[in-house]
Image (cartoon, rainbow, N blue to C red):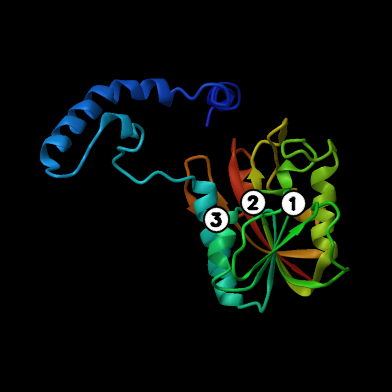
Amino acid sequence: MSRLSGFVRSWVLPFADPRRPASLVRLPGFFLDFLRYRKRALGEPVHLRDAYPCLLDRTTRTPFDPHYLYQGAWLAHRLADDRPTMHVDIGSSVLLISVLSGQVPIVFVDYRPLAARLTGVTSVAASVTSLPFADRSIASLSSLHVVEHVGLGRYGDPLNPEGSRQALHELERVLYPGGRLYLSVPVGRPRVCFNAHRVFDPTSIPPNLPGLACREFSVVDDSGRFIERADPTDFRDLEYGCGMYLLEKG
């Protein structure tokens, strides 16, 4: 990804998604389809006032976010292998949590608590910089695409330049000896993209967790490729990758 495309993603897309005005060229085709369908829908009332144009969905392939698709699969497969009796997640995608809860009971912790009632999920309101757990108390722990946001005010949390480091220290503090932490963060050219996220040098995460051993590093690169069991040093020049770390407490 070039610096220019990064600028467009950061400063243009948040204010005006160019796909939406461009989708207006598909309106004539929508109206033609509407008329064709109404002619065939014998006995079924079809009114233009009830129409709901979905002009961006006619694609040749199913679209997906590579970071979230691959990191979710990465975590699910490893939990299936480890079979913990209980798993604690800090702030990851609630869609992922809803699926994992069918496999293992989940305690889900978020600064903005989850209001949904779901069998297998216990929701806890807390900050990742001050977790409501005792030292060395959690054997299976995850936090995917979360640590990079801490302290940038995006979700109403206090501004804190040390937020990500404090979050990492908390994750290390609560992990049980022999326990596993599944962590993902944006990796590549290190920088602060205020007020969205930070991007980390992929080699910088393990040194910030000195009590943990890195057992595995996997990555999604700038082209959306998922590479399992990779070398972090090979991905320091990414613009916006996703690094996944399996870490274990000694």
How far from the left and from the top, in percent, is residue 236? 64, 42
Q: CA distance from mark 2 to mark 3?
A: 28 Å
Residue 205 bears which disc, if any? Answer: 1
Residue 158 appears in the picture as rendered: yes
Which comes sooner in the sequence, label 2 or label 3?
Answer: 3
Image quadrant in which the C terminus is located: bottom right
The residue at which mark 3 appears reads as: 95
- Give the crowd class for mark 2: few <14, some 14-19, many >=20 residues within 10 Å: many
User: Which mark is first along the chain, 1 or 3?
Assistant: 3
Quadrant of the rendered image containing residue 123: bottom right
Residue ID at (14%, 42%): 41
- Asked if the residue under mark 1 is in contact with the one under mark 2, i.e. CB atoms within 8 Å, the reply is yes
**Label drawn at residue 4:** none
Amino acid on which disc 3 is placed: Leu
- Kind of residue sitting beneath label 2: Pro
Query: What kind of element bears circle 1?
Result: loop
